[in-house]
Amino acid sequence: MRTVAALALLAMVACVTAPSSGESIDVLDYVLGKADTWPRHGAPNHHQHQNIEGDRVCWTKYTLPWSYECWRWDDAYIYHAVDHAVDGNRRWEHYVFSDGRWLPRRLVKGEIWSLDLLDNRLTWFDAACNRADERPAPYRVRAWYEGLIDAGGDLGIRDVLVLSYQPDPDHAGPSTGEHFYFAKGAGWYRWTRGSADVWFNQIGGVARPPTPLCAKDFQG
């Protein structure tokens, strides 16, 4: 069992992995959790629920139907589709990426997958679904199989996959990178950025589906 401090250190350096085994895994087995493991909650007072529809998964946060983000997938990638769970109480404001490639569908154990999206753009929409702003938003994503670790709470020891997201990698300031943790069979259970370390690994809570205001939220 690894401590929280050790997990955080591994997430930050993201460079020490076991030798490649050549064995590949389907990332969806980690990103999507079984229905009986949702909804969940955890420190520091975070609530989250998984909603799957077709080739899309959305997570509502804080039991708020308007606070959610959605990812979609095909045979090659998982894509960041839309994010309504923006910082602050900015209800219905959201953004989308022009590229949005987020994770590969398959990942080789013991290897770090990496992708730089230098031409990606971000489009921001206001609370009335109107296009409010568009700007360059380059980012780098990396992913790796972390192995068997303790996901804590009601999840216990599980195979874990880690996604690292760094916006504007050529000019990034300290503590701007994010890490997403996924447990096989249980899905997303932890997120970190700088000093923020959010866990949702205790089963129970409000099973709130997302309530999209804009029809385009659920378009490809």
Image: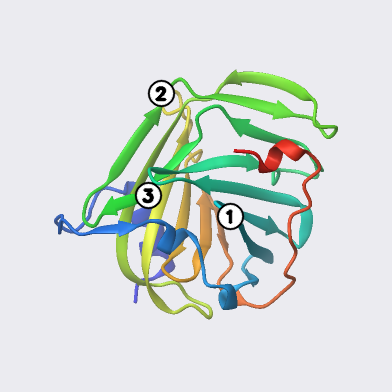
Q: Residue 87: where, in percent of width, then height?
A: 70, 43
Q: Quadrant of the C terminus?
A: top right
Q: Amino acid at mark 2?
A: Asp
Q: Residues within 10 Å of mark 3 (few under 14, many from 20)?
A: some
The span from disc 2 to disc 1 (Cα, nearest Å) is 36 Å
The answer to which image quadrant residue 96 occupies is top right
**Residue at 42%, 22% in the rendered image:** 118
Decide if residue 149 is on the left or right side of residue 49. left
The span from disc 3 to disc 2 (Cα, nearest Å) is 26 Å
Decide if residue 211 is on the left or right side of residue 79. right
**Residue at 48%, 75% in the rendered image:** 152
For residue 87, the mark is: none
Label whose residue precedes the other's in the sequence (3 or 2): 3
Nearest-to-viewer mark from 1 and 3: 1
Q: Residues within 10 Å of mark 1 (few under 14, many from 20)?
A: few
Mark 3 lies on residue: 105
Do the residues bearing badges 3 and 2 touch, measured as CB atoms within 8 Å?
no
Q: Residues within 10 Å of mark 2 (few under 14, many from 20)?
A: few
Do the residues bearing badges 1 and 3 touch, measured as CB atoms within 8 Å?
no
Q: Is residue 201 above or below residue 73?
A: below
Q: Residue 195: where, in percent of width, then height?
A: 54, 51
For residue 170, the mark is: 2
Label 3 secondary element: loop
Label 2 secondary element: loop
Q: Is residue 185 above or below residue 84?
A: below
